[in-house]
Amino acid sequence: MSSFNSDQYRVDGTQKFDITKAKTRLKDIYDNKQEYESMLAESAREMDELQSMMYAHNRYGLLVIFQAMDAAGKDGTIKHVLSGVNPVGVKIHSFKRPSDTELGHDFLWRTNAVLPQRGTITIFNRSYYEEVLVVKVDPSILLNSQRLPLELTSDLDKVFKHRYSDIKNLEKYLHRNGIRVVKFFLNVSKEEQAERLIERIEDPSKNWKFEEQDVKVREQWDEYMKAYEDCINETASKKAPWFVVPADDKKNLRLTVGKIIVEELKKMDMSYPDSSPERASELHHFIDVIKEQNTK
Protein backbone atom coordinates (compact mmCIF):
# COMPACT_ATOMS: atom_id res chain seq x y z
CA MET A 1 0.00 0.00 0.00
CA SER A 2 1.31 3.44 -0.91
CA SER A 3 1.58 6.04 1.86
CA PHE A 4 -1.29 8.51 2.07
CA ASN A 5 -0.89 12.24 2.49
CA SER A 6 -4.02 14.36 2.26
CA ASP A 7 -1.99 17.59 2.07
CA GLN A 8 -1.30 16.95 -1.62
CA TYR A 9 -5.03 17.40 -2.28
CA ARG A 10 -5.73 20.26 0.15
CA VAL A 11 -6.30 23.81 -1.06
CA ASP A 12 -6.73 26.17 1.90
CA GLY A 13 -6.09 29.59 0.40
CA THR A 14 -2.45 29.84 1.46
CA GLN A 15 -1.30 29.32 -2.12
CA LYS A 16 -2.94 30.10 -5.45
CA PHE A 17 -4.61 27.09 -7.05
CA ASP A 18 -3.81 26.43 -10.72
CA ILE A 19 -6.25 23.93 -12.21
CA THR A 20 -3.98 23.23 -15.18
CA LYS A 21 -1.47 21.68 -12.77
CA ALA A 22 -4.02 19.61 -10.85
CA LYS A 23 -3.69 15.87 -11.47
CA THR A 24 -6.61 13.76 -12.66
CA ARG A 25 -4.80 10.47 -11.95
CA LEU A 26 -2.13 9.48 -9.43
CA LYS A 27 -0.35 6.29 -8.44
CA ASP A 28 -2.70 3.80 -6.79
CA ILE A 29 -2.90 3.95 -3.00
CA TYR A 30 -3.88 0.27 -2.98
CA ASP A 31 -1.97 -2.74 -4.33
CA ASN A 32 -4.81 -4.97 -5.53
CA LYS A 33 -8.60 -5.35 -5.51
CA GLN A 34 -8.59 -7.27 -2.22
CA GLU A 35 -6.61 -4.52 -0.49
CA TYR A 36 -8.89 -1.87 -2.01
CA GLU A 37 -11.98 -3.57 -0.58
CA SER A 38 -10.28 -4.02 2.79
CA MET A 39 -9.21 -0.38 2.93
CA LEU A 40 -12.67 0.84 1.92
CA ALA A 41 -14.30 -1.31 4.62
CA GLU A 42 -11.83 -0.10 7.25
CA SER A 43 -12.47 3.52 6.31
CA ALA A 44 -16.24 2.98 6.58
CA ARG A 45 -15.78 1.30 9.98
CA GLU A 46 -13.73 4.22 11.31
CA MET A 47 -16.19 6.73 9.89
CA ASP A 48 -19.11 4.92 11.51
CA GLU A 49 -17.39 4.87 14.92
CA LEU A 50 -16.47 8.56 14.70
CA GLN A 51 -19.95 9.51 13.54
CA SER A 52 -21.48 7.57 16.44
CA MET A 53 -19.26 9.50 18.83
CA MET A 54 -20.24 12.76 17.12
CA TYR A 55 -23.90 11.86 17.52
CA ALA A 56 -23.47 11.13 21.24
CA HIS A 57 -21.24 14.17 21.82
CA ASN A 58 -23.82 16.36 20.05
CA ARG A 59 -21.63 19.44 19.69
CA TYR A 60 -20.28 19.20 16.14
CA GLY A 61 -21.77 18.65 12.71
CA LEU A 62 -20.03 17.98 9.40
CA LEU A 63 -20.99 19.32 5.98
CA VAL A 64 -19.34 17.48 3.09
CA ILE A 65 -19.73 19.08 -0.34
CA PHE A 66 -19.13 17.31 -3.65
CA GLN A 67 -18.66 19.34 -6.82
CA ALA A 68 -17.53 18.03 -10.18
CA MET A 69 -18.19 17.87 -13.87
CA ASP A 70 -20.78 15.32 -14.99
CA ALA A 71 -19.67 11.66 -14.81
CA ALA A 72 -16.80 12.45 -12.43
CA GLY A 73 -18.13 9.92 -9.91
CA LYS A 74 -19.99 11.90 -7.26
CA ASP A 75 -22.89 9.44 -6.82
CA GLY A 76 -20.71 6.33 -6.74
CA THR A 77 -18.23 7.90 -4.33
CA ILE A 78 -20.96 8.91 -1.90
CA LYS A 79 -22.54 5.45 -2.14
CA HIS A 80 -19.34 3.49 -1.53
CA VAL A 81 -17.68 5.74 1.05
CA LEU A 82 -20.77 5.98 3.26
CA SER A 83 -22.03 2.43 2.77
CA GLY A 84 -21.06 1.30 6.29
CA VAL A 85 -22.15 4.40 8.22
CA ASN A 86 -25.30 4.32 10.34
CA PRO A 87 -27.92 6.13 8.23
CA VAL A 88 -29.44 7.70 11.36
CA GLY A 89 -26.51 10.10 11.50
CA VAL A 90 -26.16 10.82 7.78
CA LYS A 91 -28.31 12.91 5.45
CA ILE A 92 -27.73 13.26 1.72
CA HIS A 93 -29.13 16.08 -0.40
CA SER A 94 -28.78 16.19 -4.17
CA PHE A 95 -29.37 19.59 -5.73
CA LYS A 96 -30.72 19.66 -9.27
CA ARG A 97 -31.95 22.67 -11.22
CA PRO A 98 -33.74 25.07 -8.82
CA SER A 99 -37.49 24.78 -8.62
CA ASP A 100 -39.80 27.75 -9.11
CA THR A 101 -40.17 28.01 -5.32
CA GLU A 102 -36.41 27.96 -4.82
CA LEU A 103 -35.92 30.64 -7.47
CA GLY A 104 -38.27 32.83 -5.45
CA HIS A 105 -35.68 33.00 -2.66
CA ASP A 106 -32.08 34.11 -2.26
CA PHE A 107 -29.44 31.81 -3.75
CA LEU A 108 -28.47 30.25 -0.40
CA TRP A 109 -32.01 29.54 0.77
CA ARG A 110 -32.47 25.99 -0.49
CA THR A 111 -29.18 24.78 0.96
CA ASN A 112 -29.48 26.71 4.22
CA ALA A 113 -32.73 24.89 4.90
CA VAL A 114 -30.92 21.54 5.11
CA LEU A 115 -27.60 22.39 6.78
CA PRO A 116 -26.31 19.75 9.25
CA GLN A 117 -27.78 19.29 12.68
CA ARG A 118 -25.30 18.78 15.49
CA GLY A 119 -24.23 15.18 15.70
CA THR A 120 -24.79 14.47 12.00
CA ILE A 121 -22.95 14.34 8.70
CA THR A 122 -24.73 16.04 5.82
CA ILE A 123 -23.67 15.40 2.24
CA PHE A 124 -24.37 17.93 -0.50
CA ASN A 125 -24.24 16.37 -3.96
CA ARG A 126 -23.73 19.70 -5.73
CA SER A 127 -24.49 22.73 -3.60
CA TYR A 128 -24.64 26.52 -3.42
CA TYR A 129 -21.41 26.43 -5.44
CA GLU A 130 -23.51 25.87 -8.56
CA GLU A 131 -24.33 29.58 -8.24
CA VAL A 132 -20.72 30.53 -9.01
CA LEU A 133 -20.07 27.69 -11.47
CA VAL A 134 -23.01 26.91 -13.78
CA VAL A 135 -24.47 30.38 -13.35
CA LYS A 136 -21.12 32.05 -13.98
CA VAL A 137 -20.53 30.08 -17.18
CA ASP A 138 -24.10 30.79 -18.30
CA PRO A 139 -25.07 34.18 -16.79
CA SER A 140 -28.36 34.12 -18.70
CA ILE A 141 -29.61 31.98 -15.80
CA LEU A 142 -28.90 34.85 -13.46
CA LEU A 143 -30.39 37.47 -15.74
CA ASN A 144 -33.50 35.58 -16.86
CA SER A 145 -34.43 33.14 -14.07
CA GLN A 146 -33.23 34.40 -10.70
CA ARG A 147 -35.45 37.48 -10.47
CA LEU A 148 -32.86 39.82 -9.02
CA PRO A 149 -33.48 43.57 -9.21
CA LEU A 150 -31.97 44.99 -12.40
CA GLU A 151 -29.68 47.36 -10.52
CA LEU A 152 -28.00 44.34 -8.89
CA THR A 153 -27.19 42.60 -12.18
CA SER A 154 -25.71 45.48 -14.15
CA ASP A 155 -22.18 44.45 -13.12
CA LEU A 156 -21.82 40.66 -13.29
CA ASP A 157 -18.25 40.67 -11.99
CA LYS A 158 -19.51 42.36 -8.84
CA VAL A 159 -22.38 39.87 -8.52
CA PHE A 160 -20.02 36.90 -8.43
CA LYS A 161 -17.50 38.70 -6.22
CA HIS A 162 -20.31 39.22 -3.71
CA ARG A 163 -21.44 35.61 -4.01
CA TYR A 164 -17.92 34.34 -3.26
CA SER A 165 -17.91 36.60 -0.21
CA ASP A 166 -21.34 35.43 0.93
CA ILE A 167 -20.30 31.77 0.61
CA LYS A 168 -17.03 32.30 2.45
CA ASN A 169 -18.84 34.14 5.24
CA LEU A 170 -21.44 31.37 5.50
CA GLU A 171 -18.71 28.74 5.91
CA LYS A 172 -16.92 30.88 8.49
CA TYR A 173 -20.24 31.25 10.35
CA LEU A 174 -20.81 27.49 10.28
CA HIS A 175 -17.33 26.81 11.67
CA ARG A 176 -17.96 29.28 14.50
CA ASN A 177 -21.07 27.29 15.35
CA GLY A 178 -19.41 23.89 15.44
CA ILE A 179 -20.32 22.84 11.90
CA ARG A 180 -17.18 21.81 10.03
CA VAL A 181 -17.12 22.14 6.24
CA VAL A 182 -15.12 19.90 3.87
CA LYS A 183 -15.35 20.47 0.12
CA PHE A 184 -14.35 18.04 -2.63
CA PHE A 185 -13.73 18.85 -6.27
CA LEU A 186 -13.54 15.54 -8.13
CA ASN A 187 -11.09 16.33 -10.90
CA VAL A 188 -11.85 14.17 -13.92
CA SER A 189 -10.07 14.57 -17.27
CA LYS A 190 -12.00 15.48 -20.39
CA GLU A 191 -10.90 12.21 -21.99
CA GLU A 192 -12.07 10.03 -19.09
CA GLN A 193 -15.37 11.91 -18.92
CA ALA A 194 -15.90 11.21 -22.62
CA GLU A 195 -15.46 7.46 -22.07
CA ARG A 196 -17.95 7.46 -19.22
CA LEU A 197 -20.55 9.46 -21.16
CA ILE A 198 -20.22 7.12 -24.14
CA GLU A 199 -20.64 4.15 -21.79
CA ARG A 200 -23.90 5.68 -20.56
CA ILE A 201 -25.14 5.77 -24.16
CA GLU A 202 -23.96 2.27 -25.09
CA ASP A 203 -25.22 0.55 -21.92
CA PRO A 204 -29.06 0.53 -21.86
CA SER A 205 -29.07 0.20 -18.07
CA LYS A 206 -27.22 3.53 -17.86
CA ASN A 207 -29.18 5.47 -20.49
CA TRP A 208 -31.15 7.21 -17.76
CA LYS A 209 -27.95 8.87 -16.53
CA PHE A 210 -27.27 10.58 -19.83
CA GLU A 211 -28.60 14.03 -20.66
CA GLU A 212 -28.11 15.91 -23.91
CA GLN A 213 -27.08 18.88 -21.74
CA ASP A 214 -23.90 16.96 -20.85
CA VAL A 215 -22.69 17.31 -24.44
CA LYS A 216 -23.41 21.04 -24.46
CA VAL A 217 -21.47 21.50 -21.23
CA ARG A 218 -18.46 19.72 -22.77
CA GLU A 219 -18.38 22.45 -25.41
CA GLN A 220 -17.71 24.86 -22.53
CA TRP A 221 -15.08 22.72 -20.80
CA ASP A 222 -12.44 25.48 -20.64
CA GLU A 223 -14.96 27.97 -19.26
CA TYR A 224 -15.96 25.51 -16.55
CA MET A 225 -12.35 24.80 -15.61
CA LYS A 226 -11.77 28.55 -15.26
CA ALA A 227 -14.92 28.87 -13.16
CA TYR A 228 -13.77 26.04 -10.86
CA GLU A 229 -10.32 27.59 -10.51
CA ASP A 230 -11.79 30.99 -9.62
CA CYS A 231 -14.30 29.44 -7.23
CA ILE A 232 -11.70 27.38 -5.37
CA ASN A 233 -9.28 30.30 -5.08
CA GLU A 234 -11.98 32.66 -3.85
CA THR A 235 -13.53 30.34 -1.25
CA ALA A 236 -10.72 28.12 0.04
CA SER A 237 -9.73 28.70 3.65
CA LYS A 238 -8.01 26.85 6.47
CA LYS A 239 -11.35 26.43 8.22
CA ALA A 240 -13.19 25.26 5.10
CA PRO A 241 -10.61 23.78 2.71
CA TRP A 242 -11.11 22.36 -0.73
CA PHE A 243 -9.72 18.94 -1.58
CA VAL A 244 -9.00 18.57 -5.29
CA VAL A 245 -9.04 14.80 -5.77
CA PRO A 246 -7.99 13.00 -8.98
CA ALA A 247 -11.10 11.24 -10.29
CA ASP A 248 -9.98 9.24 -13.34
CA ASP A 249 -9.60 6.13 -11.16
CA LYS A 250 -12.78 5.53 -9.15
CA LYS A 251 -11.17 3.21 -6.59
CA ASN A 252 -8.42 5.70 -5.76
CA LEU A 253 -11.05 8.44 -5.60
CA ARG A 254 -13.24 6.57 -3.12
CA LEU A 255 -10.34 5.61 -0.85
CA THR A 256 -8.98 9.15 -0.88
CA VAL A 257 -12.31 10.77 -0.06
CA GLY A 258 -12.96 8.25 2.73
CA LYS A 259 -9.56 8.83 4.30
CA ILE A 260 -9.95 12.60 4.18
CA ILE A 261 -13.39 12.52 5.83
CA VAL A 262 -12.03 10.27 8.58
CA GLU A 263 -9.09 12.64 9.11
CA GLU A 264 -11.42 15.63 9.42
CA LEU A 265 -13.64 13.79 11.92
CA LYS A 266 -10.60 12.90 14.02
CA LYS A 267 -9.71 16.59 14.30
CA MET A 268 -12.90 17.26 16.25
CA ASP A 269 -12.47 17.40 20.02
CA MET A 270 -15.24 14.99 20.91
CA SER A 271 -15.90 12.05 23.18
CA TYR A 272 -18.74 9.98 24.56
CA PRO A 273 -20.49 11.67 27.52
CA ASP A 274 -18.96 10.79 30.89
CA SER A 275 -20.99 8.76 33.33
CA SER A 276 -20.64 9.60 37.03
CA PRO A 277 -20.22 6.81 39.64
CA GLU A 278 -23.67 7.67 40.95
CA ARG A 279 -25.21 7.35 37.52
CA ALA A 280 -23.34 4.09 36.85
CA SER A 281 -24.68 2.66 40.12
CA GLU A 282 -28.17 3.81 39.28
CA LEU A 283 -28.01 2.19 35.84
CA HIS A 284 -26.59 -1.04 37.27
CA HIS A 285 -29.73 -1.36 39.37
CA PHE A 286 -31.76 -1.72 36.18
CA ILE A 287 -29.95 -4.94 35.29
CA ASP A 288 -31.80 -6.69 38.10
CA VAL A 289 -35.06 -5.03 37.09
CA ILE A 290 -34.68 -6.18 33.47
CA LYS A 291 -33.80 -9.75 34.50
CA GLU A 292 -36.78 -9.86 36.86
CA GLN A 293 -39.07 -8.77 34.02
CA ASN A 294 -38.14 -11.99 32.21
CA THR A 295 -39.66 -14.05 35.02
CA LYS A 296 -43.05 -12.40 34.78
Image: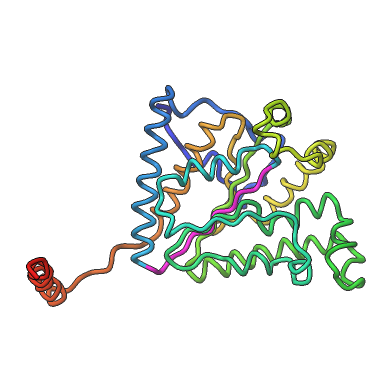
User: Can you give x and y, in whole percent of width and height, for residue 126 in the image?
Assistant: 65, 52
Instruction: Identify the residue at image location x=9%, y=71%.
Output: 296
Decide if residue 191 is in sight here: no
Look at the image and give the residue range highlighted in magenta. 58-68
The dominant secondary structure in magenta is strand
In this rendered view, identify the residue nearer to me: 67 or 266.
67
Residue at screen point 38% across, 53% down = 266
Give the vertical position of 116 relative to 214 (above or below).
Answer: below
Which sits in the foreground, 32 or 23? 32
Residue 65 within the segment the image draws in magenta: yes
- Please identify the residue farthest to the top as the structure is shown: 32
Q: Residue at x 35, y 66 (%)?
A: 57
Q: Is residue 285 visible?
A: yes
**Residue 65 percent location from the top left of the image:** 59, 53
Q: How is the image coloured?
A: rainbow
Task: Indicate the position of residue 282 as horizontal and vertical percent values.
Answer: 13, 76
